[in-house]
Image (cartoon, rainbow, N blue to C red):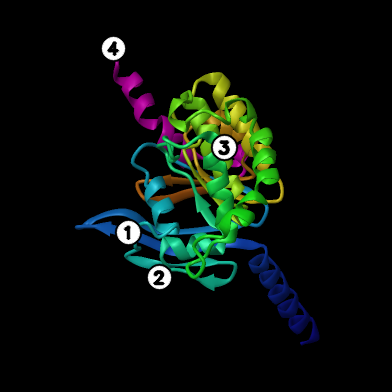
Amino acid sequence: MLDRNASALALDSATAAARADTVLEARGLKKEFHGFVAVAGVDLSVRRGSIHALIGPNGAGKTTVFNLLTRFIAPTAGRINFEGEDITSELPAALARRGIVRSFQISAIFPHLSVHENIRIALQQRIVSPLRFWGGGEAVSKLEPRTSDVLEQFELENVAHLRAGELAYGQKRTLELATTVATDPKLMLLDEPTQGLGHEDVDRITDLIKRVAAGRTVLMVEHNMRMVARIADRISVLRRGEKIAEGSYDEVSVDPQVVEAYLGSRARRREQTP
């Protein structure tokens, strides 16, 4: 009897520790659009301090899951917890105040403002609130040292004076990542951070994400498997709105369902070709 009680206590302790180590958790997440099920009961747990990648072929539901987690769209069913609190019904602005910050497939910057001003606006999030929109000139001037640090960290100091809209595409994606990091998020959600980048820019952005992820938690949607293999601690694989595998890159890359999802249709076409 004592052994049974001890085992139960050990299990409870392990469960509590796992929950404490989980930053973001989704259970039974579902989204239906006029009868079409885009996301079908997805469970997801993102560990504190990890880089977690969400992958899958086109149409798998990756971006829809992202939009659900950040409340840009409301789930049909399911529950989302952040740091142990239910956020299923919260608005995107409330999630941002909690420290959940996301980027987008299309670069989301202020094109008519300078690179320096884009960074400073991101930093100003710390000194404004719904009750205090503007911190005044003195408060803004105190942000200059941190602005310079971010520009240097992302190797943007030489283009700090340029309008963001004048930057090359790779630099725009770098700036977007810089503004995301500048808000000092607890959880960074990156939607296709290497989308549209050339080989050299992909490597540079990958190195940047790896560097700035130290001490942070990152959840990203990504199609570049080479990049995912390099930096992801854990990977969840979606197909047609369902999670079909989860684990390290070495584990999911040999999972039969994952191989079928990525290569099955192409392999069948090759076999049918005379």
Magenta stretch holds residue 197: no
Camera sees residue 95: yes
> From mark 1 to mark 3, how far is it between C-alphas?
39 Å
Mark nearer the N terminus (1 vs 4):
1
Task: Provide the residue designation for mark 1.
Answer: 31
The mark lying in front, picked from 1 and 3, is: 3
> From mark 1 to mark 2, how far is it between C-alphas?
14 Å
Residue 274: image tag: 4
Residue type at mark 1 is: Lys
The mark lying in front, picked from 1 and 4, is: 1
- The kind of secondary structure element at disc 1 is strand
- Magenta part of the chain: 248-274
Relative depth, front residue between 50 and 103: 103
| Residue 126 in picture, x, y percent from top left | 59, 58
Based on the displayed image, in which of its 4 quarters is residue 39 positioned? bottom left
> In this image, 161 relative to 207: left or right?
left
Mark nearer the N terminus (4 vs 2):
2
In the displayed structure, 260 sits above or below 37; it is: above
Q: Residue at x 40, y 70 (%)?
A: 89
The mark lying in front, picked from 3 and 4, is: 3
> From mark 1 to mark 4, how far is it between C-alphas?
41 Å
Task: Provide the residue designation for mark 2.
Answer: 89
Task: Provide the residue designation for mark 3.
Answer: 116
